[in-house]
Amino acid sequence: MKVAFGIKAHSGWAALVAVGMGDGGHLVVDRRRIELVEDEWAKQPYHAAEDLKPDAARDVVKRGIEAAHRIAVREMRGAVKREQERDNEVTACAVLVGNPMPEWSVEEILAVHFRMHKAEGVLFREALARAAEACGLRLVAIPERLLTKHATSALGVPVSGLVRKTATLGKSVGPPWGRDQKDAALAALIALQGRSK
């Protein structure tokens, strides 16, 4: 079966939902939380560097970013392997993304608290997007705030139809099936269609 991943990232973890197309329509073949950090401080590397001297701050941020990217690749490879073991082919990975961030230096980010939050939000989304590409998956980057618009266009159904579809998918796998899983499932459905508008 051809399947697609949908991923919604948070600081240090992400919700992953894999959706495929079976004889009876779309179905969830996997749903899990993937951890993207090994050390607690790495969930917020910019915050961890906030009170450090410039060289030490840059080093902490660099180590946090490198760890996030390494772990994201490891987790993505594990997810792909699980699907291969089920005789499924992962055709794409949709990652919900935010607004792009200016090319700020570490010092510029650490100077404004809001920027630290923005940088940490971008960090894990970017790590997952790069991991998908590193695993040879077609990346579908979907702006999170436009998810519903993209889904109605790609799937050709109104918002009420999307609500019913995600509810049906959720009933088939049981809890947890909250906003993270619903959004990730919609993203996976878009990726499975092979396009994002």
Image (spheres, grey):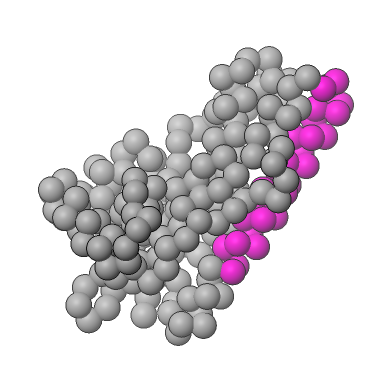
Residue 82: x, y in percent?
A: 52, 75
Write the residue at 46% across / 32% down.
Answer: 99
Residue 4: x, y in percent?
A: 40, 65
For the question of whether residue 196 can be seen, the reply is no
Question: Could you say which quadrant of the image residue 143 lies in?
Answer: top left
83 up-or-down from 176: above or below: below
66 up-or-down from 33: above or below: above
Write the residue at 45% across / 36% down.
Answer: 98
Write the residue at 25% across / 63% down.
Answer: 171
Write the residue at 59% across / 53% down.
Answer: 35
Instruction: State whether the magenta stretch is mostly helix, strand or loop.
Output: helix
Q: How many marks?
A: 0
Question: Could you say which quadrant of the image residue 111 lies in?
Answer: top right
In magenta stretch: residue 64: yes
Q: Which of 148 and 163 is in front in this view?
A: 163
In magenta stretch: residue 30: no
Residue 65: x, y in percent?
A: 70, 42
Q: Nearer the viewer, residue 40 or 106?
A: 40
The magenta segment: 52-78
Question: Is 115 left or right of 175, judged from the image as shown?
Answer: right
Q: Residue lying farthest front? A: 175
